[in-house]
Image (cartoon, rainbow, N blue to C red):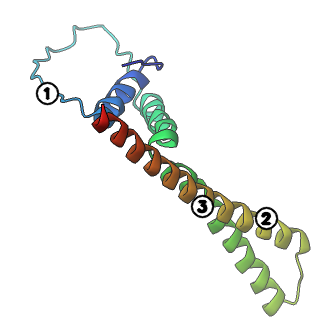
């Protein structure tokens, strides 16, 4: 395997690569001893968890593009729809128009839908690529 991450991201990258390539892994039982008195831990759960989460998200771009682009597209579309609902409410109930927010809302919806479609197309291309690679491997 060619690994590029460092720190806490390396474990995540190894797990993703093993799952992607079908490499068998085994759980090895270990015994942890209590930390010596006066020693501090180097672990920071929020920071280290964030590093692991970001590494998983980066890996999703090449392994699951529908999730990668779809999650951002869905968030953008939902934000745009929320802003559109607010503009519609203000316009109908209070007769106040918010042209700038309406334009931002439309841009968010368009951007989100485009990202969703890009994710679907990327996922289709990746599926076709995997199928083609499988055929090439079987013919060799």
Label 3 vs 1, first from the N-terminus: 1
Label 2 vs 3, first from the N-terminus: 2
Query: In percent of the image, x 29 and y 30: which residue is there?
Result: 18
Report, in whole angstroms, how far the alpha carbon at label 1 lies from the one at label 2. Answer: 48 Å
Q: Which numbered disc covers residue 116?
A: 3
Where does the C terminus fall, quadrant-wise? Answer: top left
Q: Residues within 10 Å of mark 3 (few under 14, many from 20)?
A: many
Position of residue 92 relative to residue 126, above or below, is below
- Mark 2, residue position: 107
Q: What secondary structure is found at the residue carrying circle 1?
A: loop
Report, in whole angstroms, how far the alpha carbon at label 2 lies from the one at label 3. Answer: 14 Å
Position of residue 67 relative to residue 49, above or below, is below
Q: What secondary structure is found at the residue carrying circle 2?
A: helix
- Mark 1, residue position: 26
Report, in whole angstroms, how far the alpha carbon at label 3 lies from the one at label 1. Answer: 37 Å
Where is residue 126 drawn, in percent x and y?
48, 47
Q: Could you say which is closer to the camera, residue 14 or residue 31? A: 14
Q: What secondary structure is found at the residue carrying circle 3?
A: helix
Q: Residues within 10 Å of mark 1 (few under 14, many from 20)?
A: few
Q: Could you say which is closer to the camera, residue 7 or residue 19? A: 19
Label 1 vs 2, first from the N-terminus: 1
- Asked if labels 3 and 2 touch by Cβ distance under 8 angstroms, the answer is no
Query: In percent of the image, x 48 and y 18: which residue is there?
Result: 4
- Residue 126 vs residue 27: left or right? right
Query: In percent of the image, x 38 and y 47: which residue is there?
Result: 131
Position of residue 128 relative to residue 24, above or below, is below
Q: Which numbered disc covers residue 90?
A: none
- Residue 88 vs residue 126: left or right? right
Farthest residue toward the front?
139
Q: Nearer the viewer, mark 2 or mark 3?
A: 3
């Amino acid at each position: 395997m060619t690994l590029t991450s460092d720190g806490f991201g390396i474990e995540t990258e190894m797990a993703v690569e093993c799952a992607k390539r079908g490499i068998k892994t085994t759980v090895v039982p270990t015994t942890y001893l209590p930390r010596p008195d006066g020693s501090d831990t180097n672990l920071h759960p929020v920071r280290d968890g964030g590093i692991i989460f970001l590494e998983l998200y980066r890996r999703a771009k090449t392994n699951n593009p529908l999730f990668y682009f779809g999650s951002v597209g869905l968030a953008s579309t939902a934000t745009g729809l929320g802003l559109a609902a607010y503009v519609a409410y203000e316009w109908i109930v209070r007769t106040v128009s918010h042209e700038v927010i309406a334009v931002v809302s439309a841009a968010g919806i368009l951007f989100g839908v485009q990202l969703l479609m890009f994710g679907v197309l990327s996922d289709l291309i990746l599926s076709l690529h995997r199928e083609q690679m499988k055929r090439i491997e079987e013919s060799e």
